[in-house]
Image (cartoon, rainbow, N blue to C red):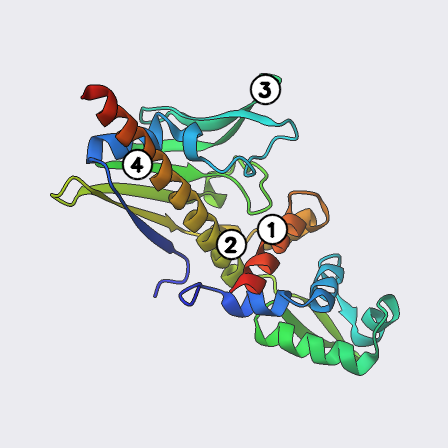
Amino acid sequence: MNDTTVKKSVTVRAPVAHAFAVFTQRFDLWWPRSHHISKVDMKEAILEGKEGGRWYERGVDGSECEWGKVLVWAPPQKVALSWHLTPAWDYDADPSKASRVEVTFHDNGDGTTRVELTHSELDRHGNDWQKMKEGIAGDGGWSGILDTYRKSAEAS
Amino acid sequence: MATYQGSKQLDALGDPTRRAIFERLAHGALPVGEIAKRLPITRPAVSQHLKVLKEAGLVRDEAAGTRRLYRIDRKGLEMVRAYFDRFWTEALDAFRKAAEETYEKQEKNDE
């Protein structure tokens, strides 16, 4: 097991093109509303459909906060993103601190799609642990995350 | 969830007292006595909780003169993984629902 990578997959009852379109163009439809970095409430989450594009949030006041860049754009098979957020949900522009999210879409041949997500190079956030712990006292930082931890621990 | 990564960390932080200790240490390293002073529990109880946190890889200790200092494990990588594991499980589930609902709607409209 590679301990710097998290892998997840899900099977969707829809064709590849549709699954890809919902993941990217309609990103805002499914992204967890609670997960954003601006102090302003999030109006929408946007993923630009081109290599070098941004993925970002737009607040209710129109302000924008970037989350990272689109590294690979190969519809409808693959999209890869750089993740410039620390686990305390702050933006860090330093590319050496960014992890990578790669998502691939496979046709199962029966009208369903297997979506595989790999979030790699997580050690880059691990090295940023000092900064992460500063966020622990703030709302929505580690205290919020720990709360999630606790709840899932109690539920399992 | 049995396959959940980092469940040891979750279990360790499931206890409110351990969570309080962990959050104290987030502000800087402390010896057992200092932690006990700041919380309504005894020194042996603090030691016991620290042992659990240490076994979960969340806290480490080191000798500092005659004292032993406890601090949050700087690496914390396992915790980062546990966090993202949990995050993507939820996010992908929401994505699956959105993709299937919009597809069903589209199919209906095409009929």
Q: State which chain disc 1 sits on.
A: A
| Contact (Cβ within 8 Å) of mark 1 with mark 2 | yes
The amino acid at mark 2 is Tyr
Q: Which residue is mark 1?
A: A145
Real-space Cα distance between discs 2 and 3?
27 Å
Q: Secondary structure at mark 4?
A: helix
> Which image quadrant for residue B103?
top left
**At which x and y percent is residue A81?**
37, 37
Number of other residues with Cα within 10 Å of mark 1, as a class: few under 14, some 14 to 19, many 20 or more: some
Real-space Cα distance between discs 3 and 4?
31 Å
Relative to A84, is B69 above or below?
A: below
Q: Which mark is residue A63?
A: 3
Residue A95 visible here: yes
Q: Earlier in the sequence, mark 1 or mark 3?
A: 3
Q: Which residue is mark 4?
A: B100
Real-space Cα distance between discs 1 and 4?
29 Å
**At which x and y percent is residue A69?**
41, 31
Residue found at x 42% / y 68%? B2
**At which x and y percent is residue B12?**
61, 69
Q: Secondary structure at mark 1?
A: helix
Residue found at x 55% / y 44%? A86
Same chain check for tags 1 and 3: yes
Q: State which chain disc 4 sits on.
A: B
Q: Which residue is mark 2?
A: B83
